[in-house]
Amino acid sequence: MKKRLITLVLGVVLIFSISPAMADTDAWYVEAVKGGEVELVPGTTTYCDKPFKIENQGMELAEVHVIMGNGSSTNWDHLQPKESKMYQLGMGEIKSPNAESHLVSEARIINSTAGTASIKVYCK
């Protein structure tokens, strides 16, 4: 019984000693746009407040998640190797019965590829 209690106490201490380090870690690593472009490896994200182009830099299929504005409009796109796609910001539709449209002033771009394909975002 005493051995079980010691094991339990050590387990709790271990869990609480790891928790503060995990609290400072973001779920997605946000890359800053420098010079109007940024390369995103899988699991990274960035923001853009201008019309932008996404280009698959890898040799495999890339999966990109684009969230426009406050999240009322999202796109899941699959880009073939070396394929690119343009996106425009501006008026967009809100999925609410009482509102017709709103101004989309920024977008969040996420490289959600399960593989190794990196994407380049041109935000100019």
Image (cartoon, rainbow, N blue to C red):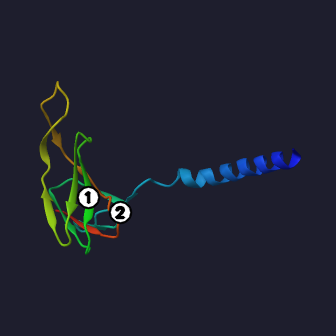
**Does label 1 or label 2 sit earlier along the sequence?**
1
Q: Is residue 91 above or below residue 11?
A: above
Crowd band around label 2 with a 10 angstrom C-alpha radius: few (<14), some (14–19), many (20+):
few
**Looking at the picture, which amino acid does disc 2 mark?**
Ala
Crowd band around label 1 with a 10 angstrom C-alpha radius: few (<14), some (14–19), many (20+):
many
Q: Is residue 96 above or below residue 45?
A: above
> x, y percentage for residue 14?
70, 53
Q: Secondary structure at mark 1?
A: strand
**Looking at the picture, which amino acid does disc 1 mark?**
Val
Quadrant location of residue 56?
A: bottom left
- Of badges 1 and 2, nearer the viewer stands 2
Residue in the image at 24% along x and 73% along y: 57
Give the CA separation, mark 1 to mark 2: 10 Å
Instruction: Compare residues 116 and 17 and report the one nearer the observer.
Output: 116
> x, y percentage for residue 121?
23, 64
Instruction: Compare residues 5 and 46 and report the one nearer the observer.
Output: 5
Question: Which labelled disc corresponds to residue 114?
Answer: 2
Q: Secondary structure at mark 2?
A: loop
Residue in the image at 60% along x and 51% along y: 20
Quadrant location of residue 102?
A: top left
Question: Which labelled disc corresponds to residue 64?
Answer: 1
101 left or right, relative to 2: left
119 left or right, relative to 44: left
